[in-house]
Amino acid sequence: MFEYFDSHNYAWNQTLQIALAGPGNINEIDTYCRHLKELSRGGPDAAQAAWLESWRKLAAHVEELAIRDEEDGHFLSAGRKYIRASMYYIIAERNAHHQDPRKMETYFKILSTFKKGIQMSREAVEFIEVPFRGDAMPSLLIPAPGSKRAPCMVVLDGFDVMKEITYLHIGDAYRRRGVALLIVDHPGVGEALRLKHMFMEPESEVWAGACVDYLETRSDVDSERIGIIAPSLGGYYAPRAAAFEKRFKCCVAWAAQWAPKVSQPGAPTSMPSSQLLFATGKENVEEAQKIRNKMTLVGVAEKITCPFLVVHGEHDQLSPVSNAYKVIEAVSSPVRKLKIFTQAEGGAEHCQVDNITMGVDYMADWVAETLGGNVK
């Protein structure tokens, strides 16, 4: 993996890769973040304030360029820049402590720049609300082209992912294959967490089922061809949902999860304690960890009977590759497949963040073949 920061600072390097896997530009990033290289040697928690402000300044710079284009009537150009600014705001917000007031300030900038970018770029995205428990889960619907009822994938988030990141990474890969997407901010993540105070809960089939309920009301979606996919911690969420919600006709675990593990000293972690407290709404790590500890596929995976795909990287530093073998061996589905991306072909890191196109294309092809989309 490209290590722009200190090689021991996995968190910062991984986050940079997330930006570059979307619309991020390394030259812009270098201009505003080069001074962080020295600070990165202090570990993932070093100079948190400097990280936040550097990425916010970068995002604000690109947003200002977008505003100029918009004032000149160049809406497509403005749209591209607004979308890039939203990614930089995402990176700034991602590593901010949940009690830092600038976190929410930055989050509102994510929402505003992303929406402007999508609208001005004229991208095929609907901003919708999926009804849930008397409220709603903010979501993005990317319809498939054409007038026929199309298959659709419900896309859940990971631990610290949000619908905007997912869209910026996946883009129109599924749409071009004739498959619609419903990208959801569900309990514990994104807008559902930050603005609606829906906290993390292990029973993903509950809110994933609400997504199916919604899709069944749409005339452009074939309710008999709905699948589910999710990255990172979503490698637990999606399989759990498929195990108990039998309306899903296929499932993709984008980085396998098996059971919570005890982190070793010095090992990378995808769950900083502050973020875990934020996601669960708990006041202490012990109570928050109790919720996380319920997220296991032990005794669950064998209940998965729909076509099932696991995509994993051989050098995944957050979820060992052994998890992928455990999951694929446990599921009961007669149609199951395991894809391990190697260093030689690219995509060997967590969720293929080192070359995300490898994973996205592979999964989109498998889904199109499984649900009846376009594979050519």
Image (tube, rainbow, N blue to C red):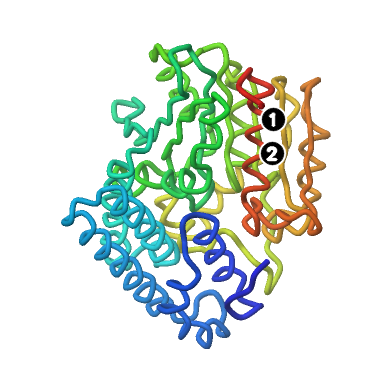
Q: How many labels does the image show?
A: 2
Query: In front: 1, or 120?
Result: 120
Residue 63 rendering spot, x and y as whole percentages: 28, 62
Q: In this view, does 73 lie to the left or right of 103?
A: left
Residue occupying the point 47% across, 24% down? 144
Q: Which residue is drawn at 52% across and 48% down?
A: 169
Nearer to me, 207 or 49 = 49
Compared to residue 49, the image places residue 376 above or below, namely: above
Q: Quadrant of the N terminus?
A: bottom right
Q: What residue type is labelled 2?
A: Tyr
| Residue 364 screen position, x and y as percent | 63, 34
Measured along the vertical axis of the image, is residue 312 above or below residue 228? below
**Label 1 SS:** helix
Q: Is residue 67 left or right of residue 52?
A: left
- Label of residue 362 in the image: 2
Q: Residue 366 carries which label?
A: 1
Left or right: 205 with respect to 371?
A: left
Q: In which quarter of the image is the C terminus?
A: top right
How packed mark 1 is, by other alpha carbons closer than 10 Å (few <14, some 14-19, many 20 or more), is: some
Determine whether, in the image, residue 357 is placed left or right of residue 288: right
Q: Which of 89 and 364 is in front in this view?
A: 364
Q: In this view, does 86 lie above or below 202?
A: below
> Circle 2 sits in a helix, a strand or a loop, which is it?
helix
Distance Cα–Cα, label 1 vs label 2: 6 Å
Q: Which mark is residue 204?
A: none
Q: What residue is at 37 percent from the left and 77 percent from the top? A: 49
Label pair 1/2, CB-CB below 8 angstroms: yes
Residue shown at the point (77%, 28%) measured from the top left: 331
What is the three-letter code of the residue carrying label 1? Answer: Trp
